Amino acid sequence: MFLAIDVGNTQSTLGLFDDEGQLAKGWRMTSNASDTSDMLHARLFSYFLKDGYELADVSAAAVASVVPALTRAWWRCLGDLLGRSPLLVNATHDYGMPIDMPNPRTVGADRIANAIAARNAYGSPVIVVDFGTATNIDVVDDRGAYRGGAISPGLMLSANALFSKAAKLASIPVEAPEHALGDTTETAMQSGLVIGAAAQAEGLVSRMKAELGIEQAKVIGTGGLARTVSRATDLFDAVDPTLTLRGIREIWLQQHGGA
């Protein structure tokens, strides 16, 4: 089985793929930069045990990480588990997708995985909107090249800032309200947060399409809050929550000749 790990600033997502390439099981865990390789191994063992798998089932693994300390910890953890180093996704390697940017090395590993998985699944041009700690928009043009995108504070980052800095605004369920015009404090906040995130994505995607002349590009939503935001917009051609994990696996396959 293949283990894909997407390490974000707030949460890490783990996906266990069977030999047919199907996602057999997924887990989420808090990203804690102080975690050691031994701590990660213990957590991984508990997840596998709970769901009836064994660590020995894993024959290969790859990691896309934006947290350097956890990149090193996972590298050691998986190296001990596999008896060889896992693949670390980064922009310094050629994964068969041109990166048409002045400094390709600065592109986050998760953004590369999203772009590759989206191009493979939906063709090009394609645009991915990933709702995580940050909201990332990634654009693949009609040549199949990665062109960049946008990064903004994520929905929950904005929500937590609002809850912590505005004394009269208590924490509320983060969900799409029925109307943009909120008639209570709660629905007004939900409108600003969820419909606001949708409107931001709509505006940025529209401008990017116009700038590159790719109005026909499909738009794919992913990330933990993609389904929530999708209820407030018709922007997305698909909501694909496993996109990043599949991209990590596809990069590993590309590096190993499709094995």
Image (spheres, helix red, strand yellow):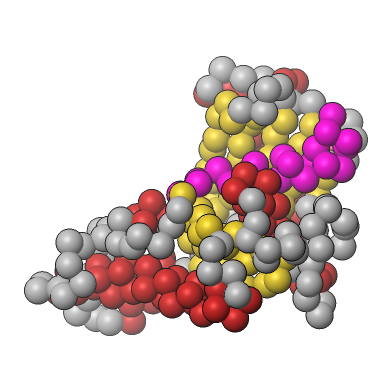
Instruction: Please give the name of the residue rendered at 68% of the width and 72% of the height, measured from the top-left corner.
Output: 148
Q: Residue furthest left?
A: 183
Q: Is residue 188 above or below residue 60?
A: below
User: What residue do we see at 87% from left, 43% from top?
Assistant: 255
In this rendering, the count of numbered labels is 0
Seen in the image, is 142 located left or right of residue 255?
Answer: left
Quadrant of residue 10 within the rendered picture: bottom right
Numbered range of the magenta stretch:
239-259
Name the foreground residue: 98 vs 45. Answer: 98
Q: Is residue 74 magenta?
A: no
- Main SS of the magenta part reads helix
Q: Nearer the viewer, residue 88 or 255?
A: 255
**Image: 180 above or below 230:** below
- Is residue 151 something one can see in this rendering? no
Position of 34 with respect to 106 (left or right) is left
- Quarter residue 250 falls in: top right
Q: Is residue 181 above or below residue 40?
A: below
- Residue 242, magenta (yes or no): yes
**Residue 206 on image: x %, y %:** 48, 75
Is the N terminus in the top left, top right, bottom left or bottom right quadrant?
Answer: top right
User: Looking at this rendering, what residue extends furthest in the top direction?
Assistant: 52
Q: Quadrant of the C terminus?
A: top right
The answer to whether any part of residue 121 appears in the image is yes
Left or right, residue 125 beside residue 182: right
Q: Residue at x 10, y 72 (%)?
A: 184
Give the camera-side residue of 78 and 248: 248
Residue at image coords 55%, 73%: 209
Residue 55 percent coordinates (x, y): 70, 24
